[in-house]
Image: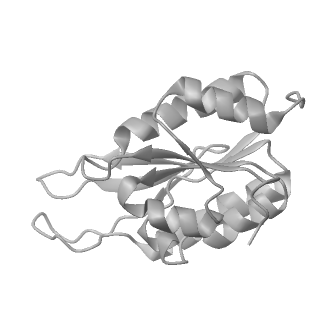
């Protein structure tokens, strides 16, 4: 487990009982584009919810911040299904984006979610830990129902941020320190 006191991790926290965190996704995307526009190197994955045709669960896509490549992480289970629709194969493919962010030495790495898979020790936890071990700040989104898993993973030292641009800016200013974008 990385030393979180020197390798900051932060999560935007949303109420997991209302939707799929679309408000957090919009805020995260705006923040990433603001940093990119200011010359910071940001890499990783953003999540998009695509409304389903004919009802049912939305289709989930992960979007590579660097290339705009899209990875489907949803299985089509039918409009009345209540089962978990995550496609672990799509998640495995998308993990390459996080490994590339590590190799590129970005100023900030973004993962779309610290969700159920990560709370159980799977999903992107290996990539998040590797990024943090390399001293790269990592920003993600966590539903309130997965906060216990987030806290276990970070040893209680991961930041929990409200859905406000000012909170994101203050956190990144702190972790960026005196570095300037290259």
Residue 118 x/y as whole percent? 52, 70
Visible residue check, residue 142: yes
In the rendered view, would you say 72 is above or below 1?
Answer: above
Residue 161 x/y as whole percent? 53, 40
Residue located 84% across and 58% down the image: 103
Q: Is residue 136 left or right of residue 88?
A: right
**Near-viewer residue (121 or 74):** 121
Residue 6 x/y as whole percent? 82, 53
Colour basis: one colour
Outermost residue, front side: 156
Q: Is residue 46 left or right of residue 65?
A: left
Residue 164 x/y as whole percent? 49, 28
Visible residue check, residue 124: no
Quarter of the image where the C terminus is located: top right
**Near-viewer residue (73 or 53):** 73
Residue located 75% across and 22% down the image: 38
Quarter of the image where the N terminus is located: bottom right
Which quadrant of the structure image shows residue 21? top left
**Near-viewer residue (148 or 100):** 148
In the rendered view, would you say 21 is above or below 119?
Answer: above
In the rendered view, would you say 53 is above or below 115?
Answer: above
Residue located 66% across and 56% down the image: 157
Residue located 29% across and 72% down the image: 84
Q: How many marks?
A: 0
């Amino acid at each position: 487990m990385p030393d979180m006191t020197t390798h900051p991790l932060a999560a935007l926290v949303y109420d997991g009982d209302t939707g799929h965190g679309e408000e957090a996704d919009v805020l995260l995307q705006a923040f990433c584009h603001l940093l990119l526009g200011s010359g910071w190197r940001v890499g990783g994955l953003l999540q998009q919810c695509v409304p389903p045709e004919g009802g049912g669960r939305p289709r989930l896509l992960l979007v590579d911040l660097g290339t705009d490549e899209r990875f489907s992480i949803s299985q089509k289970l039918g409009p009345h299904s209540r089962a978990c629709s995550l496609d672990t194969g799509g998640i495995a493919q998308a993990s390459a984006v996080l490994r590339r962010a590590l190799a590129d030495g970005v100023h900030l790495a973004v993962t779309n979610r610290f969700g159920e898979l990560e709370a159980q020790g799977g999903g992107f936890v290996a990539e998040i830990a590797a990024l943090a071990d390399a001293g790269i700040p990592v920003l993600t989104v966590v539903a309130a129902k997965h906060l216990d898993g987030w806290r276990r993973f970070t040893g209680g030292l991961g930041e929990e941020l409200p859905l406000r641009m000012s909170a994101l800016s203050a956190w990144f200013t702190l972790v960026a320190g005196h570095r300037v974008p290259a």
